[in-house]
Amino acid sequence: MKCPAKQKGLFKAILELETKISNRFGSGYGKGLLDMLTRRTPVGVTNLLCHQKPTSMFYKLAHEGALELTVEALALREEFAAIIPASTCDAARRRLAKHGMAVAA
C-alpha cells in the first residue's frame, strides 16, 4: 500500500520497531508489522493494533519489560500527535497502563 506523505515518519518508526524487535528476539519476531504495512497505512496499522485484542507479540513484549517496543507506545509519541486519532491514543494509553507502563495522561 502506498504510504501517504504525512505518514512517512510513522511508517519509518514502525519499520524501526520491527528491526528492534527482530534484533532483540530473533528474525521471526515483528514480521507481522511488515505484513500489515503491505495492506494498511501506518495510521491504519496503529489504529488496528491499539483497538483490537492485544497480540501475542504485545504480551511477549509486556512479559519481557519491553513495552516501549509496542505500536501502542509509538502511538503516544508527540511527533505523531497530529495524525493518530485521540481514540487510538486513549486505547494505547489504557492498554500500556494496564500492563504496568507509566504513561502521561
Image (tube, helix red, strand yellow):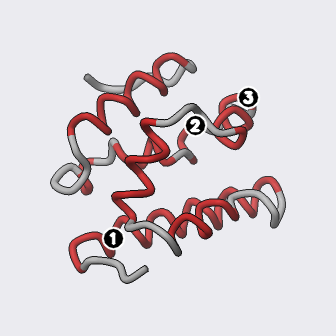
In this view, the residue farthest toward the bottom is 2
Left/right of residue 64 with respect to residue 15 in the rendered view: right
Amino acid under label 1?
Answer: Gly
Amino acid under label 3?
Answer: His
Q: Name the residue under label 2.
A: 67
In this view, the residue farthest toward the front is 39
Q: Name the residue under label 1.
A: 9
Which corner quadrant holds the C terminus?
A: top left
Examine the image and state in which quarter residue 102 appears: top left
Residue 92 vs residue 105, the one in the foreground = 92
Query: What is the C-alpha distance between the residues marked 3 and 1?
Result: 28 Å
Residue 95's x, y, as percent?
47, 25
Left/right of residue 39 with respect to residue 105 in the rendered view: right
State the SS at label 2. helix
Labels 3 and 1: the sequence-earlier one: 1
Query: What is the C-alpha distance between the residues marked 3 and 2?
Result: 9 Å
